[in-house]
Image (cartoon, rainbow, N blue to C red):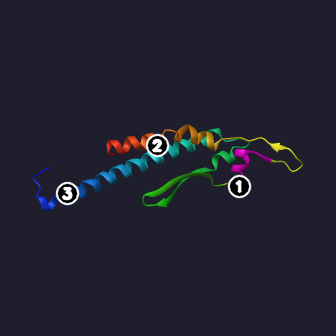
Amino acid sequence: MADIRIDQLAAEIARAVQDYTEDVSEAIDKKVDQVAGEVLEEVERTAPRQTGKYAKGFTKTKQGSGDKTKRVIWNKKDSRRVHLLEFGHAKRGGGRVRAFPHLRPAYDKHAANLPDEIKRIIQNGG
């Protein structure tokens, strides 16, 4: 950094903080997108298969705007069927249909260390 006059110090500090914030925000966004992609691949691989159409229906969507975004993995073709397969359900004549967990295990496997990765990104400045 060159010599900075005292009246320019506040502006320089604000600019440095802004650069740091943008770098960290971009790195976190990339990491979250990468983890969401890994979860999506795992869900497509472990989803119950009879014909394969159900597993092919999963997609990743970015929701929100600005700094308040999230990634959602959902089934575009059979969205109403996901919770029935994930958790099981009652049969019409009594009894239960067994569950085929595929979303939660994929999320737990790939997103478990995401908070630690985000902390590392923040500590390293992006």
Residue 12, disc: 3
Q: How many marks?
A: 3
Which secondary structure lies at badge 1? loop
Q: Position of residue 112 (x, y in %)?
A: 52, 39
| Marks 1, 3: nearer the viewer | 3
Q: Position of residue 77 (x, y in %)?
A: 67, 54
Q: Are marks 2 and 3 in contact (CB under 8 Å)?
A: no
Compare marks 1 and 3 and give the one earlier in the sequence.
Answer: 3
Check disc 1 and give the amino acid type. Answer: Arg
Q: Is residue 38 left or right of residue 91?
A: left
Q: Residue at left 61%, top 42%? A: 43
Distance, label 2 to label 3, CA atoms, is: 31 Å
Which secondary structure lies at badge 3? helix
Packing grade of label 1 (10 A; few <14, some 14-19, many >=20) is: few
| Quarter occupied by residue 103 | top right
Q: Residue at left 81%, top 48%? A: 90
Compare marks 1 and 2 and give the one earlier in the sequence.
Answer: 1
Residue matched to label 1: 80
Q: Position of residue 19 (x, y in %)?
A: 28, 54
Is residue 86 in the magenta section? yes
Residue matched to label 2: 115
Packing grade of label 3 (10 A; few <14, some 14-19, many >=20) is: some
